[in-house]
Amino acid sequence: MTLCGQPDIDTVVPPSAEASVTYMQGALGPFLAEAIAAYSSADEARRAFRAFAEMVDGCESFEETDEDGTTIKYMVTPLAFDELAEDQVALRLNFQAEGVTGAFDLVCVRIGATVAQIAGGSVLTILGGGQLAMGDLESFAATATDRLGQAA
């Protein structure tokens, strides 16, 4: 998924290393995910974080077409989130496609020379869905940023 119709920040400011993990309860979620990008310096990481923050600033909606030709419509709103890092942006992406609705909550943080994007999502279809429990994303994000801070 691109965000707000913009290229991924990794193409704007390439990291020196990156890793990601996704945890899913079932095919329809809920899910928790984290993508970490390590940069050669804190200044490079700051440039990448700023690129992300500028990309989502003022973005209220966008559309994306998946590989099957299905159009997905996203509504973007700022998200109140506990402070995890000095550089932090949090947002909610409500989405709708044919027969599917849901929401992704995303927080992007910079800690030293690392930028992390931490997300949680819930999906609802006519066949059912998975709902992320209240507080799960906050707990996951707090643990992830604590560990990044210890490693920095």
Image (tube, grey):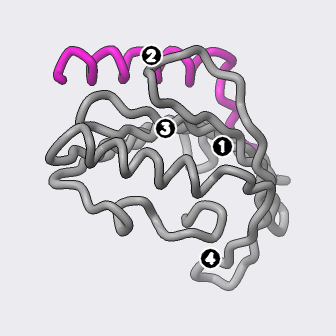
- Residue 130 is situated, as x and y percent measured from the top left of the image, at 68, 37
The disc labelled 4 sits on which kind of residue?
Asp
Q: Which residue is mark 3?
A: 108
* Magenta-highlighted residues: 127-152
The disc labelled 1 sits on which kind of residue?
Phe
Residue 131 counted in the magenta span: yes
Q: Nearer the viewer, mark 2 or mark 1?
A: 2
Vertical comparison of 136 with 104: above or below: above
Cα separation, mark 4 vs mark 2, equals: 32 Å
- Residue 28 is situated, as x and y percent measured from the top left of the image, at 63, 48
Is residue 24 visible in the rendered image? The answer is yes
- Residue 117 is situated, as x and y percent measured from the top left of the image, at 44, 41
Lower sequence index among marks 1 and 4: 4
- Residue 27 is situated, as x and y percent measured from the top left of the image, at 56, 50
On-image quarter of the C terminus = top left
Question: Disc number at residue 142?
Answer: 2
